Amino acid sequence: MWAMVPLKSPDSAKKRLAGILSGAERRDLMLAMARDVLAALCRARRLDGILIVSRAPEADALAQTFSTERFAESPDADLPAALTQAAAHLLELFHARGVMVVPADVPLIDSAEIDALLESHDSDLARHSRAVTVVPDAENRGTNCLILSPPDAIDFVFNGRSFRPHVDAAFSRGITPRILPSRGLSLDIDTLADLRHLQQAGRGTQAGTWLEKSGVAARLAESDNVGIRTGPDGT
């Protein structure tokens, strides 16, 4: 079982936070969250390998720091295409029997939860020749983790509203998917409310530490209205 971590270029990540964080801050936050995710995956016991899926230059440094593999998708690939290419790469070169897709912006991820998800997935696989596990986001709209055995069990969607399409894709292939909510994987950071949640629940994470040291946490504390712009220039 291999984890695949897609990483968008940090310079263009989290554009929905542009009214709250500067470009440099969004980049630093993205990299801090990626380090949280990779650290948790490295501590998981039921993974055989980790693959960062990214063309971003920062991916090389992350792969070296965490001793992971790195795959650069084709230049014109969107996220589903990048993951499809990466899964085929793992299947061909490493004979992967399954993949676990984990986004790089779920900083509350925990290695124990990862192992629990994989244990549940494996128990399902033991009774069937194929298995699909879908972990929804907090709103049951997106997919914050997808586990497939084999790696091409279903097609990837990942468009912000992929939870139901992934479930439907499994049923269309004759696979009854496991739907497993996960506390640590439910939060992906896209909005001011997400940042506030991270500030409260992410103490001890690299992303949470970055919020404090960067001064962003102090700016958030000064804002009483969720709708207010809290950028570094005070606007």
Image (cartoon, rainbow, N blue to C red):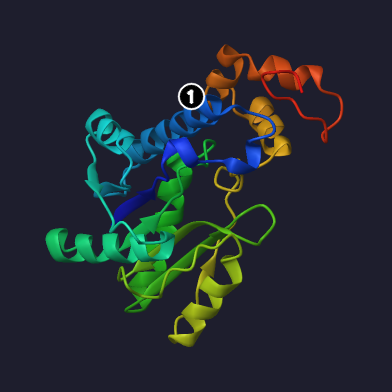
Q: Which residue matches tag 1?
A: 206
Horizontal and vertical percent position of residue 53? 32, 50
Q: Residue at x 45, y 51 (%)?
A: 116
Give the camera-side residue of 125 and 186: 186
- Numbered disc 1: secondary structure: helix
Horizontal and vertical percent position of residue 70? 24, 45
Q: In what quadrant of the picture does the C terminus appear?
A: top right
**Which class describes the residues within 10 Å of circle 1: few (<14), some (14-19), or many (20+)?**
many
Residue placed furthest toward the right: 225
Q: How many marks?
A: 1
The image quadrant that residue 140 belongs to is bottom right
Q: Residue at x 68, y 38 (%)?
A: 194
Q: For this view, does 213 lie left or right of residue 152?
A: right
Horizontal and vertical percent position of residue 137? 61, 54
Give the camera-side residue of 182 and 27: 27
Q: For this view, does 38 lie left or right of residue 137?
A: left
The image quadrant that residue 222 belongs to is top right
Q: Residue at x 59, y 22 (%)?
A: 203
Three-letter amino acid code of the residue under disc 1: Gln
Please tell me whether residue 70 is drawn above or below residue 74 in the rendered image. above
